[in-house]
Image (tube, grey):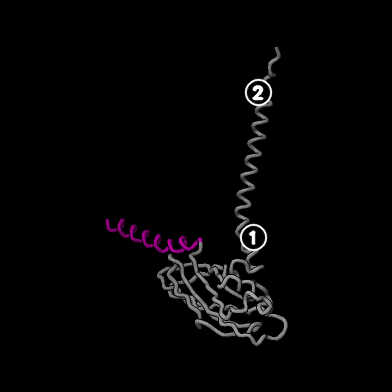
Amino acid sequence: MSGSVPTPPGDLDRKLKRTALACAAVVAGMVGLAYAAVPLYDLFCRMTGFDGTPIVRTASPIGPALDRAMTVRFDANVAPGLDWRFSSEAPEVTVKVGETQTVLYRIRNEGAVPSTGIASYNVQPALAGAYFVKIQCFCFTEQTLQPGETVESAVVFYVDPAIAQDPNMNDTHSITLSYTYFPARNAKTAEARPADAATSSAASKLQQSR
């Protein structure tokens, strides 16, 4: 009667170590893909206009503007946690398709401490994202404002003449560009410093009074 040959302790340890390393490599790879997925998805959206994300380019369109007019509305929002006032210089503009247009936004810190925000954007209807092209914008760039500070930021855009070739867009006569400012990751740190300083000063005065 033959029995199985027991695995030497040394070989068993090596197998366990290889298995553990393989598992660690898989976990590390999954974490890396998770972090890479966000910027890759954003890049894909900005290149294709997917999910209402405007396409970003660096030059104006080639050729004359079309006679077709398009009303572009501007929506400005501030997420909770950021004491800012955010608005466009005009609620809407009417432009010709293929015509480059510049619109200014005003951002003001209404709070009592410095704060940092970052803006995201979206276009509605979602199908229009493939034809709404931004040449210059302030999105995805951290902006730090001192208490009471006001800045103006420009958005330069045009509606791609290719929209006239899309039968799904024949009945589209208006586009909404929506911006939302969110607190940046370091906003809490920036806001905590004055509070920490005030707390330290009060503690120091209390100790001196004793």
Say which quarter of the image contains residue 139.
bottom right
Report how far apart the C-alphas of labels 2 and 1 lie in the structure: 46 Å
Decide which of 96, 164 is in the foreground and name it. Answer: 164
* Dot in front, 2 or 1: 1
Q: Main secondary structure of the magenta part?
A: helix
Q: Quadrant of the N terminus?
A: top right
Circle on res. 9: 2
Image spot of residue 201 (x, y percent):
36, 61
Say which quarter of the image contains residue 155.
bottom right
Residue furthest out toward the bottom: 67
Decide which of 86, 173 is in the foreground and name it. Answer: 173
> In the picture shown, does residue 201 fall above or below 64?
above
Residue located at (49% from left, 75% from top): 107
> Does residue 203 show up magenta in the picture?
yes
Decide which of 208, 35 is in the foreground and name it. Answer: 35
Residue furthest out toward the left: 210
Residue located at (65% from left, 43% from top): 25
Residue type at the position of mark 2:
Pro
Circle on res. 40: 1
What segment is highlighted magenta in the picture? 185-210
Q: Is residue 191 left or right of residue 51?
A: left
> Does residue 113 show up magenta in the picture?
no
Say which quarter of the image contains residue 148.
bottom left
